[in-house]
Image (tube, coloured by chain):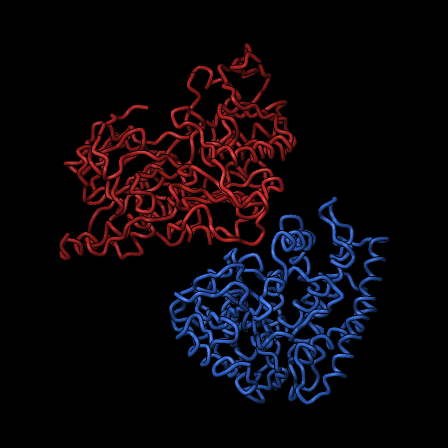
Chain colours: A red, B blue
Amino acid sequence: MHEVTLEHLKREGRIVVVGASLAGLRAAETIRDKGFTGSLTMIGDEPYEPYDRPPLSKGVLLGKSTAERTALPRRRAIDAEWRLGTAATGLDMAARRVKLADGEEVPYDRLLIATGVRARPWPNAAEGELDGVFVLRTRDDGTALARRLDAGPRRVLVIGAGFTGSEIASACRERGLEVTVAERGDAPLVGALGGVIGAVAAELQRENGVDLRTGVMVTGLEGDSTGRVRAAHLSDGTTLECDVVVVSLGAQRNTEWLAGSGLGAGPRGIACDAGCRAFDIRGIVTDDIYVAGDVARSPHPLFGYQFLSLEHWGNAVSQAETAAHNMLSVSTDRRPHIWVPAFWSSQFGVNIKSVGVPSMGTEIMITQGSRAERRFTGVYGYQGRVIGAVTFDNSRWLQFYQQQIETTAPFPVPFPTVDRRPDGHRPVPADFPDPSVPTHGPTITLSGYSPADRRMTFTPAGH
Amino acid sequence: MTHGILSDILDYANRANPYPLYEELRKTPVFHDGSGPYVVSTYYEIQSLLHDPRLSSDSRNLAATAKDPLAGEAEEEAALPPSFLKLDPPEHDRLRRMTNRPFGPPHSPHRVDGMRGDLRAIVTGLIDDLGDPGQIDLVDQFAYPFPVTMICRLLGVPREDEPRFHVWADTLAASLDPDPDADPAERQRKTHDSRMELGMYLAGLIEERRKNPGDDMLSQLAAGHGQDESMSTMELLSTAALLLIAGHETTVNLITNGMLTLLRNPDVLERLRREPTIAAPLVEELLRFEPPVQLLPQRTPLVDIEVRGVTIPKGSSMWLILASGNRDPQRFENPDRFDPDRRDVQHLGLGSGIHSCFGAPLARLEAQLALTELARRLHNPRLLEDPPPYRQNAVLRGPRHLRIACDEVRA
């Protein structure tokens, strides 16, 4: 881009942000920080101004906070035109216009797509509509579920023991509610952290009174004559009476609205380059469409240039800032998005944090603390290097392991550390499930192609 | 035996302003003169070492040959087990966790905030009693008695015993700050006696609290929490002594350094008077600008480690100069400027990692309240000498006296 056109863009251009959540908001703030004085439009399908989702499965379910109080703090005024409660339904790349559900079209010079993901619904629509069946992703979901938990159900069934499902189970136990967790895999969190850590998570659930059932699927939900859910049928032949069911089966990317637009968008998200510029379906990078947050899929140099989709809070912020910077910069001033994946969870009184990509790990070493005490640091290795780390109530050390990942330090970890236990000297298999077997889904999806991989398949939109 | 810059840093003549020496030191981020400690003085290196699990705080991991010119200073009573300050996980974590249970979140989120009223009353009382506004020693009359009284309340020392506590605390503080002209044997004897008396007193108090628990920290620590979560009496004594010593001297220095810095920056002092809400960011900047703990002298690597191209051998003695990292221009813009409006102020003043300051929330509140009230009530305050006389101690650095005058002490 020439300096002249860039200056013109900054002064009186039109930037449209589709997706009014964390990534969209932080991008908008960065855009204004960079001196953009043109028109800024924020499009969101939910009727609310940007809010924070992590509290929805924690404080909100415990009744310590309400979903209405989750509004994201603003870093600055963004002077935007808000189109809330109006979903984007289409994109005309040639005409540079976003189509809205109300029939209007919004023209842009630069477009940022941050439409994120939504909760994967229960596959049987009629069962999913029974009263008492919930998903948890939005503010409305949080309010509705919290209200139902307030009413004191006799038993809650959580389907899927990923991070969200486990946090919901934790909140139920903290409220003294009976809860069953049904997980298709062998343990909770197994997709994100592997079986060695999953076993710890399983103990944690059982010790806290969760009726955890692994290796089972819920095959059907049954309602009573008034349309309220009353029981679930499990693949082991048992029937479980429950009056609240929370479907926690991971997320689906919000890309259907881009079908047929020519943008490289599909069920795995929207592919973009390291500078957050979206690819079109021909694999050619666009120069006016940027992507950020959960819906993006971008190559990461630390992880073999694999395209990573990260459903992480910190990633949304960082990628939004990078995308916003890049859309207002000449090509030599652009920055790559090389955020090291990191996430946290809080469940059953334990603080869980992770850096890197544990799910790439083939082996794990418990370098500090002990799994039995539920206070430890686990380091994941892949092809002779450190690729990820997880801590249970041990997060102060994580920064060190992040540096190990960033410097591709050798694995097995060759040096002693404080608090090394006898079983922490040798790696063991990390025990991740076969990726072809569906579970709740990890929070990091490895997909796409390395630069050396010549195979290409185009998956059209449709989930 | 030290040469050159390290002996300059320890030299009392440089106590009032060690910062030019630190600047010199940062030219060699990992300094080693061949025999002494490995000295790290740059922000990012210190920050990363504080999170490095290859580093131990336990002196038992020091090689017998490691030479540290600070060794022997601030020795703890050998009869007590080491406090968590000088332990590694898992022992450190266990003791610190238990100590935290009656002190901070998640189990006691209201403890520190609940002390606000007490803190304010103590501050008000001390300022009321300042006496002649033309001759105030802010250390002896204010900064010194304040934190001791606070720790007494925190631990649950009965009011009538507080004066005895002050005497012991004074003697112990003096032992951290030896007068070079005094008879060392005499000083040692006094220190020893004080420690014994304090230990006996605390042991008695613990016994009493076990029988009749109150809602103070000592009662809750004595009660413990389940099998793995209770302290032996010896551990409890050493923890109580740690809280007393670590929570005392550092807070005195924070408040005194704070008032000295404000008197040197009258515009900021005036702003604090008009705008008390700046107290919180002001204290953060103060912790960066004049940290009460200048350096951490007790870290040693469990294995040879490499820092900025220098190999630090296993068992070496290391110093992490927090006060230098806080003035590192690679990290902070205009680092030598005291600027309470500084937004990016992630200082090392309270350490970082698992050993980061245990009492930080209390120290912050104490300093915020003390400085705000001093700014509000002392009319036209000024320094009577600058620089003031400092303590001997190069680690816990601060003025021994801060003589000031003001026109009047307002109500």
Q: Position of residue B128 (x, y in %)?
A: 70, 77
Q: Position of residue A8 (x, y in %)?
A: 16, 54
B303 to A250, vertically: above or below: below
Q: Nearer the viewer, residue A332 or A8?
A: A332
Number of numbered discs:
0
* On-image quarter of the N terminus of chain B: bottom right
Q: Is residue A247 left or right of residue A19?
A: right
Q: Nearer the viewer, residue A209 or A450?
A: A450
Q: Residue at x 49, y 25 (%)?
A: A185
* On-image quarter of the C terminus of chain B: bottom right
* Quarter of the view holding residue B164: bottom right
Q: Position of residue B250 (x, y in %)?
A: 62, 71
B261 to B288, vertically: above or below: below
Q: Nearer the viewer, residue A8 or A168?
A: A168
Question: From this viewpoint, which residue is outermost toward the top?
Answer: A225
Q: Is residue A173 left or right of residue A457?
A: right
On the question of residue A197 being in view, the answer is yes
Q: Position of residue B100 (x, y in %)?
A: 66, 54
B287 to B174, vertically: above or below: above
Q: Nearer the viewer, residue B49 or B407?
A: B49
Q: Is residue A275 left or right of residue B16?
A: left
On the question of residue A69 being in view, the answer is no
